[in-house]
Image: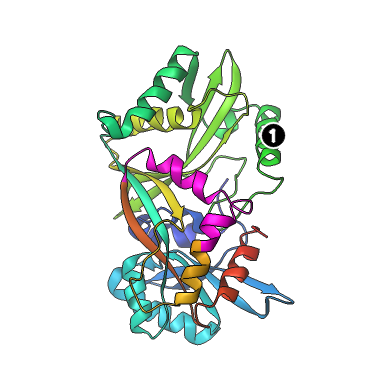
Amino acid sequence: MIHPDWQRLEPYLKHYGQSCLSYSVLQTGMHYYLEEGIGFIAYLPFRHPILAPLGRKIILADPICASEQAQGLLQRFIAIHKRVIVLQCSAFIGQVLEKLGYEVNHFGQETELPIPFDLAGKERSKLRQWRNKCEREGVSVEERAISAGDVGEIAALSQAWIQEKGGKELTLLTRPFVNADEPDVRCFWARQQGKLVGLAIFDPMYAQGKIIGYYHNFDRITADAPNGTSVFIILEAMRQFEAEGVQKVSLGLMPLYVLRKHFRHNEFTMKGLKYAYRKLNHLYPFQGNISHKKKFNGLRQPVYFSSTQGNRLWEMFILMKAMRMI
């Protein structure tokens, strides 16, 4: 399946789309502010009668452009749309936003795994245990296109997974599942005794026209799959990527992990997010997500959010509603 805006976005995405969320800008509902020869900003128009009656434009990740063009592109976009939230941007874009006069709050850490990925050492012992367990219990992983899968089998797996997660699928920070082949997206399947027990999707990360890495965007794992099946799929995929010369795999966001003051920020909102990490895991499994990714002992980079309306907790409620968390 080709995204309707693929032809005009592809040149910029493949040259500048090196963030883990770069490919996620192609998800349904996104709009694009594109300046020919420079790049584009992907954003979700969001309006809510109580939380945001005047609306917000939610920018996902960094602008897709050269670093020296980012400030101008953001300034021109904000001049048009006024009420803007930037979600999960890099430290570089955080510096730009602070320079433009906006608060910039720490939002968590992104985790990257270098390729080759060494499993030796105490820090990654759990990964070895899970890999060995899956191998002993007959789990096999293969790469196949979505179109090569059984439609009913995929639907049953997705339905069971969504029900286990509370009956809803999040959006924005996780690109929703597309049941069709997409350019450069990789799909790995895990089976045990012929039964589908897991499915993982990896989105490409680009630089200067080449794929430099993949983002483990999401997986679907059955409740009766052996413990560690998700990890086993990632490790097997990384083995394939290594043979192709790919440099890294991103596990994406560790939300609200070890929040710190890095820029001029809203202190009350930071305290509120720390509370959410401790007490609101029924809304989103913050602690489980982070505990899982910490076992990889990867490289971490801080990411941020910022609102032109000030980083009040109200802006976070708007984001949570837009992401379907509430």
Q: Is residue 92 above or below residue 132?
A: below
Looking at the rendered image, the quarter that the N terminus falls into is top right
- In this view of the protein, can residue 201 be seen by the observer? yes
- Is label 1 in a helix, a strand or a loop? helix
Q: Looking at the image, can residue 184 be seen? A: no
Residue 214 x/y as whole percent: 39, 44
- Within 10 Å of disc 1 (Cα), the crowding (few <14, some 14-19, many 20+) is some
At 70% from the left and 31% from the top, the residue drawn is 156
Residue 67 relative to residue 285: left or right = left
Q: Nearer the viewer, residue 133 or 88?
A: 133
- Which of the 4 image quadrants contains residue 323? bottom right
Query: Looking at the image, is 34 positioned above or below residue 217?
Result: below
- Amino acid marked by disc 1: Ala
Q: Is residue 260 above or below residue 20?
A: below
**Extreme right residue here?**
49
Comparing 12 with 77, the one in front is: 77
Span shown in magenta: 275-298
Q: Measured from the top left, where is residue 311 in percent x and y?
A: 50, 77
Of residues 286 and 77, which is closer to you in this image? 286
From the viewer's perspective, tell me whether residue 65 is left or right of residue 173: left
* Residue 238 coordinates in the image, percent (x, y): 35, 33
Residue pictured at 63% horizontal, 54% vertical: 283
- Which residue is disc 1 drawn over? 160
**Which image quarter: residue 152?**
top right
Residue 175 is left or right of residue 96, and the answer is: right
